[in-house]
Structure formats: C-alpha cells, structure tokens
Image: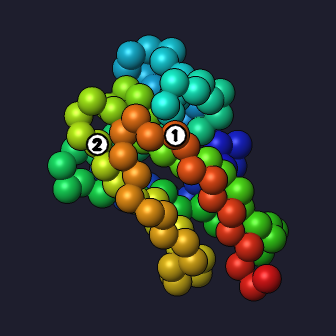
Amino acid sequence: MTDLEYARAEGNAIKNLYFKEWTYPAGYNFHIAGTKYLNGMGIILYGSDSGKVSHNLNGDYKRLTSLIGIDDYTKNFAARGRVTILGDGVEIFKSEQLTGGDPAKKMLICPGY
C-alpha cells in the first residue's frame, strides 16, 4: 500500500500519516519489536484518537498481505490499538489487540475466497 496513492485520509491521519519512515525523528524507519522495515504506513495516534486511510483499488487486487504492529518509537507509552480493514464499507478484517513492543503480526485478507 505504500506505493499506491491513497484516496483520502481522515481523523488524525490527515496530519500524522507517514510512509516508509517517520518525519520526526527525521529518517527514522519503522521498527516493530526491534525489526527494521523499509516499507510501511504509520499513523501517530494519541489517547482515543483514530485515523483512517482510504485507497481506491477498483477490483484490481485479489488479496492483501501485510505485517502489522505498533512501532518501537511509541512502545514505552503503553501503546495499544487495532487495525481494521474495510472492503466496500464492510469490515473484512479486525486485528487482535496490538501492544507496543510485541512482534509484528501477519495479516492475510482474501475477500471472496
């Protein structure tokens, strides 16, 4: 998803959406449980904030695979959250509770299969 142009951002994602690396600290790549990732998408959320990023895929993709987790940059702030994926407005994936410092979790979505 980092190479696809997103359609829109909502909520906290409008001002706190990052691709491949954080802006502050400058050049800091995404890290989950000590593992560095050269690709990715991150949203900085505070407290009960939420953020949403939408992509128009136009039926061009059959599946989505990813690793999801909370970046080490915030792991000591009791960071917790979930990733929810919607397809045509319908929830097709909801992660288990993610906690800062935990290893990345695999996500595989094959809608219609």
Task: Please state if 108 lies on the left or on the right of 30 as rendered.
Answer: right
Is residue 10 visible in the rendered image? The answer is: yes
> Crowding at label 1, few (<14), some or many (≥20) Cα neighbours within 10 Å?
some
Kindly identify which residue carries mark 2: 79
| Residue type marked 2 | Ala
Residue depicted at x 55% and y 72% = 93
Kindly identify which residue carries mark 1: 103
Residue 13 at x, y = what percent?
38, 49
Q: Is residue 22 above or below residue 92?
A: above
Task: Please state if 87 lies on the left or on the right of 70 as rendered.
Answer: right
- Secondary-structure class at tag 2: loop
Q: Is residue 5 above or below residue 40?
A: below
Q: Residue placed farthest to the front in the image?
A: 102
| Residue type marked 1 | Pro
Residue 70 at x, y = what percent?
42, 41
Q: Residue placed farthest to the top in the image?
A: 26
- Secondary-structure class at tag 1: loop
Is residue 15 visible in the rendered image? The answer is: no
Q: Which-is-in-front pick, marks 1 and 2?
A: 1
Q: CA distance from mark 1 to mark 2?
A: 13 Å
Residue 19 at x, y = what percent?
55, 36
